[in-house]
Image (cartoon, helix red, strand yellow):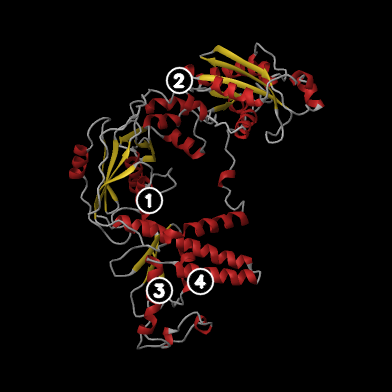
């Protein structure tokens, strides 16, 4: 039995009140609309010459902030002509060391708003960093970005502040002076929020994630989110026949589901799914871990067509060291109770083949697929002539003489993979010395495929070997999130109330937890994804081990200790192919503009 640590009865914390909306309503949010005048466009080489800001809440002006700033450098002539701010005007003005702390204190607790917010907020953040002033992490709203998603080209040919000022008939005309531009931007903000209110955007969270992609038909389905739980759980979108279309999880189910109907979902497939959906069901969960695990299980069971990941856990591949007179490596889809050694799971045949090649480059196992016998010989292959196979096919080696290669391979797969890494380094060095860099990179990538999978499998195997783990983690609003894990499967979950003694709840959930019978291989009782989720949860801060039945450990010299080399290898691959993964560069689909 492992040493148990019992969580304390209570934690000093504050409970966050729940709201019937997504975050604070916009009418209760304090916005600070800010505008800067500067000596140029780069915050790293240019300085601020003027700060102007307007504080508003609920459509009312609460205060204003305005001051010139001495940039301690000459203002370029074209900037002076554009803004009207000259060197003489800022000569006696306070420096940024004085202005910035005063402004940040004045704006504390508010949401920053600016027209082209990356420019203004970037200058403020860069100057705060240069002055060693902690940046409070202001939320920010960009009225230019928001206008692009709200207005049509018929209404505004562009989203310049001067254009939007005319569209919304602001009381102040922007003139490249900070306070005047901030006042105009505040009027533009109120005009945009009025438009958004008609689209159902009534909270800060909805405003942050607004994309302008939702149709009127989608927005009319907001009623589907009514009655859903506001805590952690899993939600299922269903079609008219009750079939699951999409399954997801959230810490606040009602809030997340509502986001699908308020133009905050940029994925076009989700827009299509929402158009088909006729109902939404939810399963309330004790905490976030239970929600994540239930999501994975439901996706694997129902295989909804709009879920891309986790639908086919049974299609995972494994690298198998066979049990025969002359064992070899083979890629298989199923685990068998045959005494063989398995490495995996792999998400694709390509990765599995790369890991197999990494082993073959370090250990001269036979690579032919036919079944061999010491009593029957056959012609050798080309690998034997190259010295990369001991040629058991023609009797060149007996099973006993071949056995050390099998032992080495088994140790690479389940224990110490450092011999494979050493062989990889030697081969890479030799190829690099011959300026065969692409081949060296291929050797590196195959080793990465093997070592990453070995490290993962060793973590999964250690968890799957434990008959029972009881762990607890501090809850967001007090109390404890408790999980019972048996053979790597989440068997029970409970959340203890704030201020209550946790031990009775722990005993109750252990007594009522699912009975788990271990199966075969590293994923004996749960899928690899479920065990990964549990391991991530166990690694979070404030997670405590309450009870341990069995031994929970990994090999002392296992693949998990090679993280530094793996990170360096990944960094080298990304540097060599900076544009190889273009997932972050996909264009966002937008509805076609109306014909004039």
Foreground of the two, 469 or 127: 127
Quarter of the N terminus within the rendering: bottom left
| Number of the front mark, 1 or 4 | 4
Residue named by callout 3:
408
Q: Earlier in the sequence, mark 3 or mark 2?
A: 2
Foreground of the two, 3 or 576: 3
Q: What whole-number distance in Å separates the C-alpha atoms at marks 1 and 2?
A: 37 Å
Determine which quarter of the picture holds residue 259.
Answer: top left
Q: Earlier in the sequence, mark 3 or mark 1?
A: 3
Q: What whole-number distance in Å separates the C-alpha atoms at marks 2 and 4?
A: 61 Å
Q: Earlier in the sequence, mark 2 or mark 4?
A: 2
The image position of residue 255, as x and y in percent, is: 40, 29
Q: What whole-number distance in Å separates the C-alpha atoms at marks 3 and 2?
A: 63 Å
Q: Earlier in the sequence, mark 1 or mark 2?
A: 2
Q: What whole-number distance in Å separates the C-alpha atoms at marks 3 and 1?
A: 28 Å
Q: Secondary structure at mark 3?
A: helix
| Number of the front mark, 3 or 1 | 3
The image position of residue 481, as x and y in percent, is: 30, 38
Residue named by callout 4:
423
The image position of residue 81, as x and y in percent, is: 80, 22
Q: Secondary structure at mark 4?
A: helix
Name the residue: 22% across, 34% down.
501
Q: Which mark, residue 25?
A: 2
Residue named by callout 1:
532
| Number of the front mark, 2 or 4 | 4
The image position of residue 101, as x and y in percent, is: 59, 24
């Amino acid at each position: 039995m492992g040493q148990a640590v019992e969580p304390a009865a209570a934690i000093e914390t504050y409970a966050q009140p729940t709201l019937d909306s997504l975050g604070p309503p916009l009418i209760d949010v304090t916005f600070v609309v800010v505008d800067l005048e500067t000596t140029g466009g780069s915050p790293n080489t240019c300085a601020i010459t003027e700060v102007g800001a307007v504080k508003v809440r609920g459509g009312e002006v609460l205060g204003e902030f305005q001051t010139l700033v001495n940039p301690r450098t000459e203002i370029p002539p074209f900037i002076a002509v554009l803004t009207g701010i000259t060197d003489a005007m800022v000569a006696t003005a306070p420096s940024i060391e004085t202005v910035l702390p005063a402004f940040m204190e004045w704006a504390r607790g508010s949401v920053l708003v600016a027209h082209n917010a990356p420019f203004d907020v970037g200058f403020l953040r860069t100057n705060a960093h240069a002055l060693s002033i902690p940046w409070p992490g202001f939320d920010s709203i960009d009225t230019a970005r928001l206008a692009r998603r709200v207005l049509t080209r018929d209404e505004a040919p562009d989203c310049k502040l001067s254009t939007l000022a005319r569209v919304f008939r602001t009381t102040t005309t922007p003139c490249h002076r900070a306070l005047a531009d901030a006042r105009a931007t505040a009027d533009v903000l109120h005009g945009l929020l009025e438009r958004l209110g008609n689209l159902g955007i009534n909270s800060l969270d909805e405003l942050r994630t607004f994309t302008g992609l939702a149709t009127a038909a989608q927005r009319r389905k907001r009623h589907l989110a009514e009655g859903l739980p506001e805590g952690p759980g899993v939600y299922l979108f269903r079609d008219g026949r009750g079939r699951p279309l999409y399954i997801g999880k959230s810490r606040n189910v009602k809030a997340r589901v509502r986001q699908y109907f308020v133009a905050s979902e940029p994925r076009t497939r989700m827009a299509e799914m929402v158009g088909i959906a006729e109902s939404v069901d939810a399963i309330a969960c004790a905490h976030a871990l239970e929600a994540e695990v239930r999501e994975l299980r439901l996706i694997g069971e129902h295989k909804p067509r709009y879920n891309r990941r986790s639908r086919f856990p049974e299609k995972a591949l494994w690298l198998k060291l066979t049990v025969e007179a002359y064992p070899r490596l083979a890629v298989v889809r199923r685990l068998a109770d045959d005494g063989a050694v398995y490495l995996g799971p792999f998400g694709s045949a390509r990765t599995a083949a790369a890991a197999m090649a990494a082993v073959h480059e370090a250990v001269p196992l036979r690579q032919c697929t036919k079944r061999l016998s010491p009593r029957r010989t056959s012609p050798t292959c080309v690998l034997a002539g190259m010295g990369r196979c001991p040629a058991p096919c023609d009797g060149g080696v007996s099973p006993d003489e071949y056995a050390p290669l099998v032992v080495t391979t088994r140790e690479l797969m389940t224990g110490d993979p450092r011999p494979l890494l050493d062989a990889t380094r030697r081969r890479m060095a030799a190829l690099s010395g011959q300026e065969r860099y692409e081949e060296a990179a291929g050797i590196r990538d195959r080793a990465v495929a093997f070592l990453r999978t070995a490290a993962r499998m060793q973590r999964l195997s250690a968890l799957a070997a434990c008959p029972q783990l009881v762990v607890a983690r501090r809850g967001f609003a007090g109390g404890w999130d408790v999980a019972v894990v048996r053979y790597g499967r989440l068997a029970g979950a409970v959340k203890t109330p704030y201020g209550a003694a946790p031990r009775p709840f722990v005993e109750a959930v252990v007594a009522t937890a699912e009975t788990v019978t271990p199966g075969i291989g590293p994923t004996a009782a749960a899928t690899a994804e479920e065990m990964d989720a549990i391991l991530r949860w166990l690694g979070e801060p404030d997670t405590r081990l309450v009870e341990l039945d069995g031994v929970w450990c990994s090999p002392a010299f296992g693949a998990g200790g090679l993280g530094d080399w793996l990170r360096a290898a990944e960094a080298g691959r990304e540097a060599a192919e900076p544009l190889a993964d273009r997932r972050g560069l996909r264009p966002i689909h937008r509805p076609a503009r109306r014909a004039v």
